[in-house]
Amino acid sequence: MHETERLIDVEWVGNKSVDKRYQVDLEVTGYDRNGLVNEILNLISSLKVPITRVNGHADETKQAKVSLSIMVPNKHELHRAVDRIKQLKDIYSVERIFK
């Protein structure tokens, strides 16, 4: 019997955890202006990242805080979303919140 006769054709079955996503809580701080929250939400939506919670408020100094929970599959997608939010006009900071 030759070695090649002992070979068996195999296929890899996809990993079932590919669709698994993790909830990440973020706090975005920026200048309170019209459309700021909409821009943040539209950006996250354009990245195909589900948003599960959003809450925002502004203080008398025109500083807005937007808290949101997003569902990401991995750290790479989290960093991509955070970096893109930071590029929006009037954003001061984006921080991950651990509850």
Image (cartoon, grey):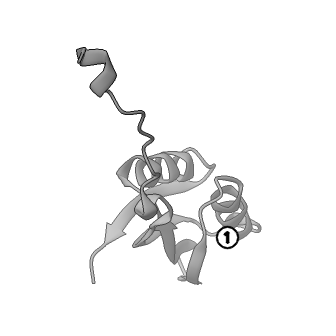
In the picture, measured across the screen, residue 76 lies left or right of residue 51, that is left
Q: Where is 89 relative to 72, above or below?
A: above
CA neighbours of label 1 inside 10 A, class few (<14), some (14 to 19), many (20+)? many
Q: Position of residue 6 (x, y in %)?
A: 28, 27
Residue beneath the point at 40% across and 46% down: 76
Q: Where is 37 relative to 73, above or below?
A: below
Q: Quadrant of the N terminus?
A: top left
Where on the picture, by quarter, is residue 52?
A: bottom right
Residue beneath the point at 64% across and 53% down: 47
Q: Residue furthest front?
A: 1
Where on the picture, by quarter, is residue 12?
A: top left
Q: Secondary structure at mark 1?
A: helix
In the picture, measured across the screen, residue 38 lies left or right of residue 79, that is right
Residue beneath the point at 46% across and 58% down: 18
Give the number of callouts: 1
Q: Quadrant of the C terminus?
A: bottom left
Q: Position of residue 4 (x, y in %)?
A: 31, 17
78 or 91, nearer to the observer: 78
Q: Where is 45 relative to 79, above or below?
A: below
Q: Position of residue 81 (x, y in %)?
A: 51, 52
Residue beneath the point at 47% across and 62% down: 72
In the picture, measured across the screen, residue 37 lies left or right of residue 74, that is right
Q: Where is 43 relative to 59, above or below?
A: above
In the picture, measured across the screen, residue 13 lies left or right of residue 44, that is left
Q: Amino acid at mark 1?
A: Val
Q: Position of residue 14 (x, y in %)?
A: 47, 52
9 or 60, nearer to the observer: 9
What residue is shown with label 1? 37
